[in-house]
Image (cartoon, rainbow, N blue to C red):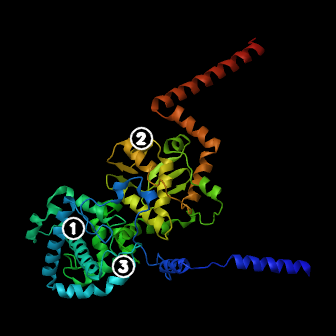
Amino acid sequence: MESERKINEADDSISMESIVIDNDGIVEKLKNNIAKKLLYDSPLPASCCIFRVPHQVRRQNVQAYEPDIVSIGPYHHGRCGDQFRLMENVKGWYLQRLLSHANLTLETLIKGVMDLDKPARNCYAEPLDHLNKIDFVEMMVLDGCFLIELFRKGLSILEQDENDPDDTDDPVFSVSCMLGYLQHDILLLENQLPWFVLERLYNITAVKNTTSEGNAIFLADLVEHFFRQFIGGDGTGFREILHPSPNILHILDLMRTLIVVPIENSAIENSVYQQNEAQRLIKRQRLPNVTTLSEAGIKFQKSSEMDIKFEKGLLTIPPLEIHELTGPLFRNLIAFEQCYDYDLMMTSYAVLMDNLIDTSKDIDLLCEKGILTNWLSPEDAAQFFNHLHSDTLVIRFYYGGLCDAVNQHYNTNWNKWMEKLRREYFGTPWAIISLVAAFILLVLTMLQTVYTIHQYYHPPE
């Protein structure tokens, strides 16, 4: 009883000491300050799909994430500088042409997208307090119509439609470097408009939404035509992906869909989702480079599919063209995967290629096999892969099963011995001739030895 009384007295003492006399109103001030910072909704809603590139990723190559000549969306809206002024004027010109072609008033166009203000804002990971509703809707109309007219003109030129007299005055298509700069800028993660905004504007301005043969053209078709050089092929394999239209978030997401969906559909057994041990996961991301694997007997071949596969000592890899715009595209796709809840397919590809390519010798070997088409120097191409995924985290590595199979083949000594024998004795016609001659000489020497021994023990009578 005495011990309980002492404990109660101690508790009362602590309680009395913890009472603060708020003569200066400090507690009330703190309460008000903290109350202003309370959030009842998540600061990053589930609808967010357009992000600022994280600093840790951006610092590796700042230019890969910054627009060169045009701002799309709110993040770079209002950027000053002579390099942006021309495209701002082109936006107004393209909008006027689009309204003229569609026989549409500006009032009708604006009313058609006014209700998209709030849902479009919710797609951005940062608050857009610097843009009120009027400014935001104006941005959607100008930027969105600019993209739609740009894609339509791209298809028109592809079909060699010469009925548009304004093409000769168009700085985008008459100045050779402009198109490349625009393709770079439109594929930046920070330079995106929500896809549903583009689709609404495309449907409102529905004019000439058919090919010269009368086939319907969807917005995704226009975008795929415009960026076809980045994904290769003639476009015939993409219609199954685009129609019915997948749940596209924005243009960069569409590009990822065209690249990744065939991979997801072809060999999902390569995934490593069942791996939980971090050390085991890191180990499955390691491979010797192309030159080392080649010396161990592993062959390389250009794949007709979009996935990387390994069977019976043959590693098939889809072709890739490396040029000045490849790096920014891959970097922004990887940054998008790091921010959004997606499987890390592009990041896994970057890790795998980084393993396979260490030096210019590896680049040369893959170019010889037709897997790479390199417009850079071999040294720059090797550096491109070596730094592509720096400061990123791969917690779900897609090619874990493939790496296991390749490493098992590589670590089998028999495969190394057979490849060494093939290279040293069957690598050239002269080596084969020398080996055959040596074999014949060995057989003749053995026959002579046998004959001599036989003569010694069985001399003729």
* 3 and 1 marks in contact (CB < 8 Å): no
**Quadrant where the image shows the N terminus:** bottom right
The answer to whether residue 231 is visible is yes
Cα distance in 3D space between marks 3 and 1: 29 Å
Could you say where residue 231 lies in the image, as x and y percent from the top left? 35, 62
Q: Which mark is residue 121?
A: 3
Pick out the residue farthest to the front. Answer: 23
Q: Earlier in the sequence, mark 1 or mark 2?
A: 1
Cα distance in 3D space between marks 3 and 2: 45 Å
Which is nearer the eye, 443 or 339?
339
Q: Which mark is residue 168?
A: none
- Classed neighbour count for the residue bearing mark 3: other residues with Cα under 10 Å, few (<14), some (14–19), many (≥20): many
Pick out the residue farthest to the top. Answer: 461
Cα distance in 3D space between marks 1 and 2: 36 Å
Label 1 is placed on what type of residue? Answer: Gly
Hey, which quadrant is residue 100 in on the image?
Answer: bottom left
Left or right position of 332 against 293 = left
Q: Circle 1 is placed at which residue position?
A: 154
Q: Secondary structure at mark 1?
A: helix
Above or below, comparing residue 131 to residue 451 in the picture: below
Pick out the residue farthest to the left. Answer: 165
Nearest to viewer (mark 3 / mark 2): 3
Label 2 is placed on what type of residue? Answer: Ser
Q: Circle 2 is placed at which residue position?
A: 360
Left or right position of 423 against 107 = right
- Classed neighbour count for the residue bearing mark 1: other residues with Cα under 10 Å, few (<14), some (14–19), many (≥20): many
